[in-house]
Image (tube, grey):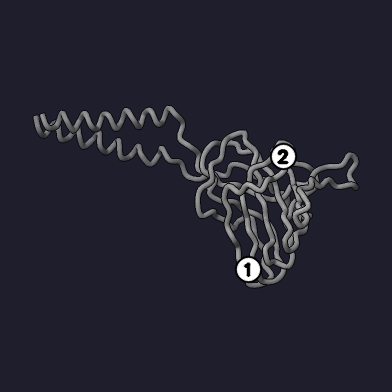
Amino acid sequence: MKNTRAVIVLVCLSAFIGFIPSIWADPIIDQSFIDPNSSSAAFFQSFELGQTFTAGVTGELIGVNLNFSTTGAGTLDVSIRSVDAAGAPTSTILGSTTITTSGNTYFLLSEFIGFPSAIASVAGQQYAIVITAETIYNGAWFGYHEDSYAGGKQWANFGGSGWYHYEDPYDDPPRSWDLNFRTHVIPTPEPGILILLGISMASVVGLKRWWKE
C-alpha cells in the first residue's frame, strides 16, 4: 500500500512541479512600431523626446528596444511615464534607466534596454517612452511621419517649455510622426490559471496528509 501511495504522490508532485513554470510566461513583445524609411527626430542636451503607446496586455514591462543615434560621449535617460488627458507624457516617471556612451553611438532595435525594476503595465492604458539627453550633445530617434501606429505618437519637450505634438506641415492633411520602438512585457497569469495553481497546491497538501495516514 505504501509503495502505491509513493508512486501516486511522486506522479502528482511531478505534475505540479512541471505546471509551475508554465504559469509565469516568458517576456513577449507587446507593442511595436518599426519603419525602415530612416526619417528621424532630433534631440539635444536637456531636451526630451517621447513616443506614446497603448499597452496590449497586463503584466510587467521589463524593457524596450529603441532605434536612435548619439553624437559624442555622455549620458541619457530612458524612462516610462504616465500620460495626461491630452495623451502627452507627464513628469511622473514609472521607471527609468541611464545609458552612458563613450562616443558616437548607434542603437539598433535588436539591442535590449532593460529597466532595473519591472514596471506595471495595464492593458488599454497609455504610457510614454521618453529619452532625456542629460549630457549627450545631440542625437536622433528614427521613425516615420505616416502616422502608422494607432496606439500613440511622437512628442517633444524643448528645454522644459512643455510637451508638443509634432505634425509634418508638408503633409496634406498633416500627419503625426511615430518613432521606432518595441516594448517587452511579462504577462500576468490569467485568473483561471491562478485558480488551477491553488487547486494543485491544495491537492499536494492533501496527498501529504494521506501519505501520513
Give the vertical position of 62 relative to 98 (above or below): above
Image location of residue 8, percent across then percent down: 19, 32
- In the rendered structure, are the residues bearing label 2 and label 1 in contact, judged by CB atoms less than 8 Å apart? no
Q: Nearer the viewer, residue 161 or 200?
A: 161
**Drawn side of residue 144 relative to residue 197, left or right:** right
Circle 2: is it few (<14), some (14-19), or many (20+) Cα within 10 Å? some
Left or right: residue 128 versus residue 147 is: left
Which three-letter amino acid code belongs to the residue tagged 2? Gly
Q: Residue at x 61, y 38 (%)?
A: 55
Mark 2 or 1, which is nearer the eye? 2
Q: Give the structural element (helix, strand or loop) at label 2.
A: loop
Which quarter of the rendering shows the C terminus?
A: top left
Q: Looking at the rendered structure, which numbered label has been put on residue 101?
A: 1
Instruction: Please identify the quarter of the rendering in which residue 111 is found.
Output: bottom right
Secondary structure of the residue carrying numbered label 1: strand
The residue located at (67%, 67%) in the rendering is 105
Give the quadrant of the N terminus: top left
Residue sitting at x 40%, y 31%: 194
User: Which residue was labeled with disc 2?
Assistant: 87
The answer to whether 193 appears left or right of 97 in the picture is left
| Label whose residue precedes the other's in the sequence (2 or 1) | 2
